Image (tube, rainbow, N blue to C red):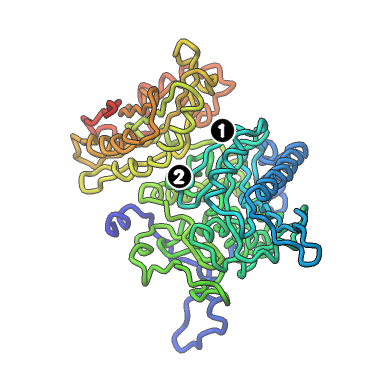
Amino acid sequence: MTDSNRSVSPKHADDRSYSPKRKGQRPKKNGNRSRQNQLYPRLKPFRDEEEQSKHLDSVLRDLGLYESKEGLEKRQKAFDDIEDLLNCWSVSVSKPLPLDSINQVPQPVEKQARIALISFGSYRLGVQKPEADLDLLALCPSHCSRDDFFASLVEILKDNSRIEEVHPIAAAYTPVIKFKFDGIAIDLLFARLSNDEKLHRHKKGESYVIEDSDLKDLDEAGVRSLNGARVAQILSSCAPDAKAFRTTLIAVKEWACVHGLYSNVLGFLGGINYAILVACVCKSNRGAKPATLLKAFFQTYSQWKWPTPITLTHVSYTPPEGVTPLPVWNAKKNPRDRMHLMPILTPTYPSMNSAYNVGLPQLRRLNSEFQNAVRILNEIENGEKSWMALFQGNEFFQRHAYFLQINIIASNAKSFLEWYRFVESRLRLLIAGLENPHHGVQAEPFGKFYDRAYNSDGVCIGPGNSAPDCKNETCLFVALRFGYGIDNADLSYGVAEFLHKVNSWNGRDAGMDVEIEVVQSHQLPNFLIEKSLCEKLDVEQDENREQKIEKWQKHDDSAPSAVTWAMKVTGNVQKRPRT
């Protein structure tokens, strides 16, 4: 693992912006701050920083990355209505209240502790896209249980006409209920406080501030559920310039989405990971505008010596007073933590690696794309390109000659949603199984799904979403690279092992399938090639557009020499019969 990681990692620059300690020089005071400055060096401002930051913001608005006033109002209404629904559920599962000591009658419902609904993620940070999920934490009083949450509450959600696609995942690392409320995708987490005192004081419309004392008597699942909201609270307050932080984070997230680097489930980074990375850069570049912060982001992490952990705050191994000791990420003492490739630690107790999903293929792609972004930003600073160049796709599908195409299929929308979510959660196993340095095989996933629409006759009609009662399909692509002199590469074992695991799922019904095939670059779906080429060649209005695409399909000048390295690829397993 270590040798292969070292062999594919980029060269790490040693020309940091701090001066080495001279012989005989006394160490500086405040060592933590000195070390922080070394890890996250302050960079010189972007040329024409103020004007370039305005241009960047204008491009982000043109791309539709800021939610409208109507969209924000719709989210707020959904938030309020979900909070009311949760408190009705809380009353329904409560035990009979103790009698009033004077009048010997049940205490009124108003005296019950309220559920505090807390937003986190992109919405809490103010960086959500119009189509983004709404991440919510239900902080419940002591009479509510997780069993009730995933049983009686789920039934209430399913019976609500404004709610659809209810999907409880109680066995997840962080248990969650996924559903859509008035068309807005919701991820709802659960945590239960042992002491209802703060919830008794909490009123509707007030922001609930999570404190260390709220961790008392929580199990590990509860702590993980609480941690996302706690991290969002800290990130909201630690950035010196909140507006610059938001603009930079919006730009980074869009760059990651366009380049297929935004997916926790597929082993890349998600919103919370990128938010912590941006916050670290903001802290070390106080007063900088978004253009400078964006350049600092890519320069810092293109040179980062992984697995050196990213730490926004000091990591505490001692629990707050009254809180049960919990496992804290520690690579020196915990062998499992030592295996993590890209540690990005949460700034709350207990510090956890928020990027534990990242694998070697994903880290290799992230490092490569960080470096490409540095090159593009230098060209933007020199006036050779505009800001749009950072968000115009990339050459992933032109850079490789062979791909593994994974098609996830179901006979209707309802079955597809369940099947897709299960298969997606297992795809990291397939990607890891394809990676084989000893046999000269590298896998490079593109973390983005492409939907294909079908009509009622089962005929594909192009990219897009099918009608609910028609065949549904989505595609994922993993590029394959082969070492020099590799004439045969057998992928059948890794593919067959993955198919065995997904096909043995108890929830699999008729019509749920996975197709896996090896395709060459000229065999990629037309809509994928056309979209990618139009971004690369800028031929949207070019009269020779069709001829250029056809020429690229016949011969790809940008493809690596791996095209001639792999003369034969076996393991073209399309479908595994149900057992």
Q: Nearer the viewer, residue 127 or 109?
A: 109
Q: Residue at x 60, y 48 (%)?
A: 382
Residue 163, image x, y percentages: 63, 34
* Residue 265: mark in rendering: 2
Q: Nearer the viewer, residue 128 or 84?
A: 84
Quadrant of the frame with the C terminus: top left
Q: Is residue 543 visible?
A: yes
Left or right of 283, for residue 478: left
SS label for mark 1: strand
Disc 2/disc 1 C-alpha distance (Å) = 19 Å
Q: Residue at x 61, y 62 (%)?
A: 193
Left or right of 102, for residue 236: left
Q: Nearer the viewer, residue 423 or 115?
A: 115
Q: Residue at x 40, y 62 (%)?
A: 307
* Res. 62 image quadrant: top right
Q: Is residue 41 visible?
A: no
Left or right of 110, for residue 278: left
Q: Nearer the viewer, residue 166 or 485?
A: 166
Q: Is residue 78 above or below residue 345?
A: above
- Amino acid type, residue under disc 1 in the picture: Glu
Q: Residues within 10 Å of mark 2 (few under 14, many from 20)?
A: some
Residue 342, image x, y percentages: 43, 57
* Residue 165: mark in rendering: 1
